[in-house]
Amino acid sequence: MGYAVIKGVSYVLAHTPDVLIQHGSVQVQARAKDPSDPYFQQLKDHLRPYEDVVSYPANQCYIGNLTPQQLSDIPQPWFENKEHNANQGKFGEIYNQAQFYAMLNHVDVFNLVQLTQEFIDTYHGQVAHHSLYGDDVDLLAGHQLITKDQILALLEHHHAEVLMMNGEIVGCVKAAHDEDENLSAHIMLENLCTKASGVMAAMHLKQQGIDLDKVDYLIECSEEACGDINQRGGGNFAKAIGESIGCNSATGSDVRGFCAAPAHAMMLASALVKSGIFKNVMVVAGGAVAKLGMNGRDHVKNNMPVLEDCIAGFACMVTENDGVSPEINSDIIGRHQIGTGSSPQAVMTALIAAPLKAAGMKMTDIDKYSVEMQNPEITKPAGAGNVPESNYKMIAALAVKEGQMERTQLPAFVEKHGMTGFAPTQGHIPSGVPFLGFGRDMILNDEIKNFMMVGKGSLFLGRMTNLFDGLSFVVQKNSGKQDEVFDENQVKQVVAQAMRDVAENLLNAKSEK
């Protein structure tokens, strides 16, 4: 079989400022420690309206209205340079919070999401219908009504998590079990948000001509896990998302690996397709509620908007080779092995230098590297620096060490083979995948011939091992050549003809005697 190809990529954002305040992990911990923490009042003063979120250049880049190069040409701080305001992009969409609550209702199959009549009256006409789902689908259909007093009673006994709009109670997510903490209201809210954002991303593949009914297999690779007291991470987000988007012919499973999970998922998808087990595999991931406002204190301290105010999602369609779409070269796979070590040089050697060397390539032979694409405007105020730039400098330094270029060429390498970061800090979301859509287009437009996706993760966060993690692969221009398709009937005909020829030869030999 030929290499698998990337047929389509989508990205979505959901602006959720009230979810940030109520359910982001930093805010939850701060509230538990001191409900009167002045940070909460300061936080409200630094939240952005939806219009500013849409016009934020990094968000416009994420959904495809600006390329990374165009983004880098815009002076920073980007939040002061609002040049575009389209909520729809080439790759996806930026949803508002009311739309996201409608999606929570739509994907909820156990009546855990409950909304007030006031919310329905105010927002039904604005959010109940979306063009991707058709006019006959009401995203608020079957909504479970609840009063504010009922919500407050549930909150008092920790049986629900509140949903708010502009500081006003508009609904809640109920616990799925009275005693099982794995089915608590907090966990159910996080999981439903992951499912909803995954559904949103997957549905936007339809705009790129992807027939969801032909999906054979789904791999979900977010950082959440669903299960109950007897199997805490049992799954399965993949099939739950597939059910919601109409992938009736598909099965699927979840892949977890912290930030590196999308790279693992893409590798598995390409292997499944190349082997012929499945023809059309979707890799999809919803966002992480916990990461909302993760660096909020630092943003407030620096008198800037709190930029981690969106739940993100992405989806990628991996299919059998069509002779046109960029190929995933599964013969060039970089992997962080258990014995690799965790030093930056060891990691970059394992993920980049070693697999390319084995393939007879230099690091300068890769046109673009998609690494950890965090938006530096989010990370720098928190002291984490410019993460993508640091990665590119390490790759360049390794190329110098390997004797593949001169030290004086290091800045030019970073400029040519790197790019500015633009993805929200949602853990798995920035890890290599934000460039898949742009890279695919650039290869199709003959702007580049290949790129390498590099995903990395920190396994020590789970307190089971101190190991690091990472995986990389190369995406390249399609060769345009298709492997011959195995035709069983044709083979039978050839074999039958061969047997007839043998029999005829034997008869001729006997007659000559």
Image (cartoon, rainbow, N blue to C red):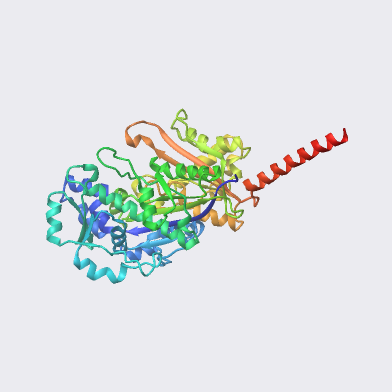
- Compared across the picture, whether 398 is left or right of 103 comes to right
Q: What residue sits 32% from the left and 40% below the top?
A: 233
Residue 249 visible somewhere in the drawing: yes
* Residue 62 or residue 40, whichever sits in front: 62
- Spot occupied by residue 495 in the image (x, y as percentages of width and height): 69, 41
Q: Quadrant of the C terminus?
A: top right
* Residue 263 or residue 435, whichever sits in front: 263
Q: Quadrant of the N terminus?
A: top right
- Compared across the picture, whether 196 is left or right of 349 comes to left
- 207, above or below 110, in the image: below
- Spot occupied by residue 127 in the image (x, y as percentages of width and height): 31, 67
Q: What residue sits 20% from the left and 46% below the top?
A: 177
- Spot occupied by residue 444 in the image (x, y as percentages of width and height): 59, 57
Q: What residue sits 38% from the left and 48% below the top?
A: 238
Q: Indicate the quadrant where residue 410 lies.
A: top right
Q: Indicate the quadrant where residue 383 lies.
A: top left
* Residue 508 or residue 161, whichever sits in front: 508
Residue 379 visible somewhere in the drawing: no
Q: State how many labels appear.
A: 0
* Residue 258 or residue 72, whichever sits in front: 258
The extreme top residue here reads 339
- Compared across the picture, whether 102 is left or right of 341 comes to left
- Spot occupied by residue 278 in the image (x, y as percentages of width and height): 50, 47
The extreme bottom residue here reads 125
